[in-house]
Image (spheres, rainbow, N blue to C red):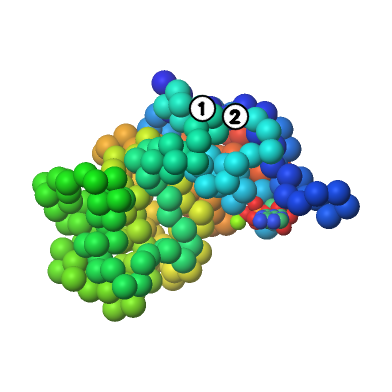
Amino acid sequence: MDILKIENLSKIYGKGETAVKALDNVSFSIKKGEFVVIIGPSGSGKSTLLHMLGGVDRPTSGKVLIDNTDIYSLDETQLAIFRRRQIGLIYQFYNLIPILTVEENITLPLLLDGHKVDKEQFNQIVTVLGLEDRLQHLPNQLSGGQQQRVSIGRALISNPAIMLADEPTGNLDSKNSNEIIELLKMFNKTYNQTLIVITHDERIALQADRVIAIEDGRVAKDEVIRP
Ligand SMILES: Nc1ncnc2c1ncn2[C@@H]1O[C@H](COP(=O)(O)OP(=O)(O)O)[C@@H](O)[C@H]1O
Ligand SMILES: [Mg+2]
């Protein structure tokens, strides 16, 4: 089953002389449970692509279907709700809320939706992430690796259809990088969580089911490593 389908996706930033075509007619599908790595030189359009997949910014043209919902046919309010429930986003610099504790950061997407926290699921996630004894800490009281684990917890708490990570290990040393990738892979394999990761790290790309290379806003290569 295709959990994600993009059709003729293009994104142009700006207008006239200064316009930049960041994505140029990109199409592909991703199956539920796939672990896909996106590689490509700096400025090739990787982050733009991830933002389009994540409902963060509207494309200039083309479609994004997630679990059969055409997300850019939704209005802003509907899209914000869809994003919170169905898309787990992970960034290089964690993007945690500094005045909220670890527990509050992780459960925020549910609370914004007016949903109760499923204690059992919450406990399971924080245990796997090794954050049980850090729940009342603030982000600035944690290491980089711990902060990234919090952002993984926040991305997973609403059982999203897809998880998107933009250079999630870009700010970490190799030990913490390995731990973060092992955790993402664990959620991918154990819970069949679809995972799309942008990275410059070849060792991470080698662990994926499939590698998509982006160059000049186009798909330059799309290679299945593990069928
Ligand atoms: N908000 C923006 N406004 C204008 N140009 C942008 C914006 N975001 C990205 N770009 C341009 O689009 C191209 C692709 O950028 P990006 O998707 O960030 O590439 P990557 O993540 O592969 O480094 C680059 O030329 C970049 O300068
Ligand atoms: Mg980028």
User: Secondary structure beneath disc 1?
Assistant: strand
Rendered view: 75 above or below 69: below
Q: Where is residue 62 in the image (x, y as percent from the top left)?
A: 65, 30
- Left-right relation of 107 to 14: left
Mark 2 vs ligand 1: CB under 8 Å? Answer: no
Q: Position of residue 20 (x, y in %)?
A: 78, 50
- Left-right relation of 129 to 143: left
Q: What residue type is labelled 2?
A: Lys
Q: Where is residue 2 in the image (x, y as percent from the top left)?
A: 45, 24
Q: Which amino acid does label 1 sit on?
A: Asp
Mark 1 vs ligand 1: CB under 8 Å? Answer: no
On the image, numbered disc 2 is attached to which residue? 63
Looking at the image, can residue 70 be seen?
yes
On the image, numbered disc 1 is attached to which residue? 70
Q: How crowded is mark 1: few (under 14 residues within 10 Å), some or many (20 or more)?
A: some
The image quadrant where one finds the N terminus is top left
* Residue farthest toward the right in the current orientation of the protein: 17
Residue nearer the viewer, 92 or 102:
102
The structure residue drawn at horizontal position 50% and vertical position 32%, both measured from the top left corner, is 74
Q: Are marks 1 and 2 in contact (CB under 8 Å)?
A: yes
The quadrant in which residue 136 appears is bottom left
Looking at the image, can residue 26 be seen?
no
Image quarter for ligand 2: bottom right
Earlier residue among tags 1 and 2? 2
The structure residue drawn at horizontal position 49% and vertical position 48%, both measured from the top left corner, is 197
Q: Position of residue 15 (x, y in %)?
A: 80, 49
Residue nearer the viewer, 171 or 89:
89
- Left-right relation of 61 to 2: right
